[in-house]
Image (cartoon, rainbow, N blue to C red):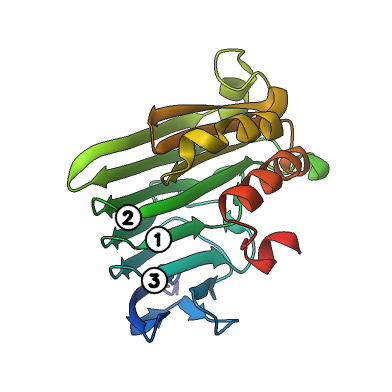
């Protein structure tokens, strides 16, 4: 007699975190914190800024996973958020896509440092990621999104994967910075083209919204060297792009830029 075996689908990770700040006696402090599932927030310091480290206890992202993060920076307060380590997008089952959704609001006079460490993509991953930030009239922002397309030291190449990425930054609801990336199939072959990345497998997009954006652009360009470029979208809005052969070269040129733009307050986890 043949027994029928019912196969249950593998469990999928979910995470949801909500973080908000307020000002008390001249210091930025937590106003609200909620977390569920595989998303956890830890707070290593108790200074004038709410410094948070996002931890994915699932150990990475695969097809079918869903993660949501909501950030609310109150007027005149500051939140600096990074990740514990590089995030990893692993191989997904056919037809399954992992999703990451992050939304942030920054009040008037508020400041958000969105500084996640690298996202490392593995072959056969499938990931859809979206970041949306809305700034008040006088809000400030430092944002970076580094992505590694396979670890060159391990001989990895992304020959069959799906990566959809979208960044939207608005000011008072009006478009300020939109960036989108849609790569499918043999990503390594796409990155090898001179019009794409000229063989680079590590890249980062960044945005700096602050009154001194125009004053610092020459220093930013000097740090980026031949590996990237920076442009002023508006007198107080600086956008940058960096493409490198591997993650080590990317960090070598990105760290001094982030140090300068963060006024030497870059989270310690970036230096480990």
Q: Dot 3 corresponds to which residue?
A: 14
Where residue 151 appears, as percent x and y from the top left, is 73, 44
| Residue depicted at 76% across the width and 38% down the height | 249
Relative horizontal placement of residue 170, taking residue 57 as reference (left or right): left
Tag 3's secondary structure? strand
Mark 1 Cα-neighbour bin, 10 Å: few <14, some 14–19, many ≥20: many
Does the CB distance between marks 1 and 2 fall below 8 Å?
Answer: yes
Q: Between disc 1 and disc 3, whose residue precedes?
A: 3
Rounded to the nearest whole Å, what is the CA distance between mark 3 and mark 2?
A: 31 Å
At 54% from the left edge and 76% from the top edge, which residue is drawn?
Answer: 57
Which corner quadrant of the image does residue 32 belong to? bottom left
Mark sitting earlier along the chain (1/2): 1
Q: Is residue 14 or residue 103 the one in the foreground? A: 103
Q: CA distance from mark 1 to mark 2?
A: 6 Å
Q: Using the image as rendered, state which of residue 208 and residue 196 is in the foreground.
A: 208
Q: Is residue 75 left or right of residue 129?
A: left
User: How far is disc 1 from disc 3 in space, using C-alphas?
Assistant: 28 Å
The quadrant the N terminus occupies is bottom left
Which residue is identified by label 2? 139
Which x, y percent locates residue 175?
23, 37
Q: Is residue 11 above or below residue 188?
A: below
Circles 3 and 2 in contact, beta carbons < 8 Å: no
In the rendered image, residue 193, in percent from the top left (x then y), is placed at: 60, 15
Q: Is residue 46 above or below residue 249?
A: below
- Residue that badge 1 annotates: 111
Q: Secondary structure at mark 1?
A: strand
**Circle 2: is it few (<14), some (14-19), or many (20+) Cα within 10 Å?**
many
Q: Nearer the viewer, residue 77 or 182?
A: 77
Dividing the picture into quarters, in which one does residue 233 lie? top left
């Amino acid at each position: 007699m043949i027994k029928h075996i019912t196969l249950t689908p593998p469990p999928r990770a979910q995470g949801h975190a909500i973080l908000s700040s307020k000002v008390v006696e001249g210091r930025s402090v937590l106003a609200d914190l909620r977390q569920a599932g595989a998303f956890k927030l830890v707070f290593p310091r108790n200074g004038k800024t709410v410094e948070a480290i996002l931890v994915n206890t699932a150990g990475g992202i695969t097809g079918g996973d869903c993660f949501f993060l909501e950030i609310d920076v109150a007027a005149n307060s500051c939140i600096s958020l990074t990740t514990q380590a590089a995030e990893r997008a692993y191989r997904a089952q056919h037809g399954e896509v992992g999703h990451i959704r992050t939304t942030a609001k920054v009040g008037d006079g508020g400041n958000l440092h969105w500084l996640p460490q690298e996202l490392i993509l593995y072959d056969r991953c499938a990931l859809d990621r979206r970041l949306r930030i809305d700034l008040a009239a006088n809000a400030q922002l430092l944002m970076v999104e580094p992505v590694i397309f396979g670890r060159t030291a391990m001989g990895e190449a992304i020959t069959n994967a799906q990566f959809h990425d979208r960044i939207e930054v608005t000011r008072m609801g009006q478009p300020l910075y939109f960036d989108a990336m849609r790569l499918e199939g043999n990503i390594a072959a796409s990155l090898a083209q001179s019009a794409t990345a000229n063989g680079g497998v590590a890249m980062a997009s960044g945005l700096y919204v602050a009154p001194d954006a125009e004053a610092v652009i020459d220093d930013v360009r000097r740090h980026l060297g031949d590996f990237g470029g920076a442009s002023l979208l508006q007198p107080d809005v600086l956008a940058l792009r960096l493409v490198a052969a591997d993650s080590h070269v990317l960090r070598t040129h990105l760290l001094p830029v982030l140090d300068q733009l963060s006024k030497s307050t870059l989270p310690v986890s970036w230096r480990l």
